[in-house]
């Protein structure tokens, strides 16, 4: 009975977060964890709001770094999504195209993406271009693979019925195939975008002159743990917002399927 | 020969032709200086220097990379299984924690590397634990999701037949979740290789350290050879795990 009541409460994750925050605050305060390594939660929050108000972190302007990361991410998404969709559509819908290119896509996907980052750095340099291309590279495979499976799962009877009603070429794609493949397409887009963000941050941390990844490196070298935790929190907030907003959008767009 | 087999052979031939054309195009682009040979060596240069991958230095670096990977994967797997089963068995706990596990999983985990190196210092321990974190997250999330997907009717039937809790887990739950778990294991192994490489590229040691060293010395042929061979190595392991996964889940 009690468990059932507890289960019905929607605020369990908030309770859990509160407990974690209390432990995080207490451990450095009572000396169980070195406060120089893990600063208390309230200290991090203080620095967090200080950064928001003064726009300064470790003597550097914060907004340009944030904008650099976001612009790299936006460029990566803007290039990755149409490319991923086009490849996914061709491989998923065109039989021979799919037979030829699907093994190559899976072969490339099997290689851990980070392995090729040093090559990207050598060819494209340490600037923003290498981050954008790496973001595309990390995001495009999950995006394409889920879009392919989305197109593959389209019920053939829908297409037959639409053909009987006289639908052709563009009409068939626009009104039958794409809406039927929408769950796979949206899942691919969500995963592609989330992975592109991971790729951009990964690339920035491994070598960059600007961006949130660069701030993480700078905080590490300067041993500024408060700033480090603030940057980590900001990255976590961005990735969480991204993930959940895309998920909500996905649910909204697929609401017609539930009915 | 059956028409499907004939088609498969033709497709395989076309795939090989695409790969060969890519290599030839790369060779020509470097020869005509469209790609700078200082940063992009031609495939023929790579072939000439390919003895490097049999050198003691490369093999030692590979072992340096793989040893913490094996330790981290084992540790992450055991911890992920234990914690995942524990959380998955208690629904309120699952509801409270699962969302945060997902958040961490969907974020770039390299941001936690500085905390690991400060807590456990640079070296084998922090590297193993950083790899274990990647494996742990994947396995834990997979186990929790798989446990919540077990059909209650199977459990009820086992209960009616008088099975104990251990028997239900061993005979009903575990066979049900094992194919999903193996899929998670494969994803976790791939994530662990990425974690190991990220650690090494930043802090040295193993294949990543070797790549950084040769990149600094401006010896791109060794950078390419080390990355390509490590990539192929990981792809072979991944491919083997995919085949094993298909075999294990074929009964479904």
Image (cartoon, coloured by chain):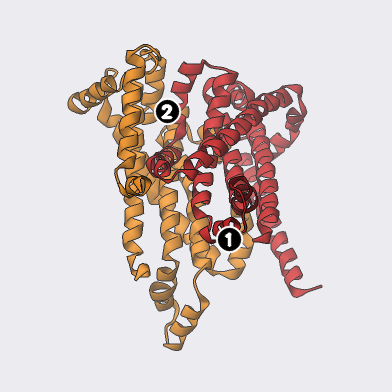
Can residue A71 be seen in this snapshot?
Answer: no
Q: Quadrant of residue B67?
A: top right
Mark 2 is surrounded, within 10 Å at the Cα level, by few (under 14), some (14 to 19) or many (20 or more) other residues, namely: many
> Where residue A208 is drawn, which disc sits there?
2
**Camera-side residue of B125 and A21:** A21
Q: Which chain is red?
A: B
- Marks 1 and 2: which is nearer the front? 1
Mark 1 is surrounded, within 10 Å at the Cα level, by few (under 14), some (14 to 19) or many (20 or more) other residues, namely: few
Q: Is residue A48 left or right of residue B156?
A: left
The chain ID associated with circle 1 is B
The chain ID associated with circle 2 is A
Please give the name of the residue rendered at 59% of the width and 21% of the height, measured from the top-left corner: B213
**Camera-side residue of B143 and B235:** B143
> Where residue B157 is drawn, which disc sits there?
1
Can residue A36 be seen in this snapshot?
Answer: yes
Quarter in which the C terminus of chain A is drawn = bottom left
**Camera-side residue of B130 and B153:** B153
Q: Is residue A217 left or right of residue A50?
A: right
Q: Which chain is orange?
A: A
């Amino acid at each position: 009975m009690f468990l059932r009541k507890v289960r019905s409460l929607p605020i369990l994750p908030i309770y859990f977060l509160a407990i974690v925050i209390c432990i995080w605050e207490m451990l450095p305060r009572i000396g169980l964890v070195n406060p120089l390594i893990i600063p208390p939660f309230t200290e991090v929050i203080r620095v967090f709001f200080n950064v928001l108000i003064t726009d300064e972190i470790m003597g550097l302007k914060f907004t340009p770094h944030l904008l650099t990361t976001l612009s790299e991410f936006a460029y990566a998404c803007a290039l990755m999504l149409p490319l991923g969709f086009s490849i996914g559509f061709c491989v998923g819908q065109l039989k021979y195209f799919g037979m030829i290119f699907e093994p190559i896509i899976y072969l490339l996907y099997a290689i851990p993406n980070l392995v090729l980052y040093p090559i990207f750095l050598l060819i494209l340099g340490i600037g923003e271009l290498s981050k954008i291309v790496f973001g595309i590279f990390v995001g495009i495979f999950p995006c394409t693979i889920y879009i392919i499976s989305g197109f593959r799962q389209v019920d053939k009877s829908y297409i037959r019925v639409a053909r009987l009603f006289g639908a052709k070429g563009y009409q068939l794609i626009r009104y039958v195939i794409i809406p039927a493949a929408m769950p796979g397409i949206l899942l691919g887009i969500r995963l592609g975008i989330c992975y592109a963000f991971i790729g951009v941050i990964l690339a920035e941390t491994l070598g960059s002159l600007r961006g949130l990844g660069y701030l993480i490196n700078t905080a590490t070298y300067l041993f500024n743990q408060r700033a480090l935790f603030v940057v980590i929190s900001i990255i976590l907030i961005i990735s969480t917002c991204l993930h959940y907003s895309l998920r909500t959008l996905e649910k909204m767009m697929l609401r017609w399927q539930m009915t | 020969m059956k028409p499907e087999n004939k088609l498969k052979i033709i497709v395989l031939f076309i795939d090989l032709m695409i790969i060969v054309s890519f290599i030839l195009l790369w060779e020509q682009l470097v020869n005509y200086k469209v790609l700078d040979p200082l940063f992009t060596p031609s495939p023929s240069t790579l072939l000439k220097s390919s003895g490097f991958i049999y050198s003691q230095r490369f093999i030692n670096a590979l072992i340096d990379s793989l040893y913490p990977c094996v330790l981290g994967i084992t540790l992450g797997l055991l911890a992920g299984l234990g914690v995942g089963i524990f959380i998955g068995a208690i629904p309120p706990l699952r509801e409270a924690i699962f969302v945060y596990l997902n958040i961490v999983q969907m974020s770039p985990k390299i941001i936690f590397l500085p905390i690991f190196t400060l807590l456990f210092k640079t070296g084998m321990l922090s590297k193993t634990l950083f790899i274990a974190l990647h494996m742990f997250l994947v396995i834990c999330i997979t186990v929790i999701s798989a446990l919540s997907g077990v059909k209650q009717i199977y459990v009820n039937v086992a209960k009616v037949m008088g099975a104990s809790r251990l028997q239900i887990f061993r005979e009903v739950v575990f066979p049900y979740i094992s194919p999903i778990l193996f899929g998670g294991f494969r994803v976790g192994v791939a994530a662990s290789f990425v974690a190991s490489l990220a650690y090494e590229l930043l802090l040295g040691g193993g294949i990543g350290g070797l790549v950084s060293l040769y990149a600094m010395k401006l010896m791109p042929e060794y950078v390419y050879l080390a990355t390509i061979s490590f990539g192929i190595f990981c792809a072979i392991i991944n491919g083997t795990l995919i085949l094993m996964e298909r075999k294990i889940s074929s009964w479904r």
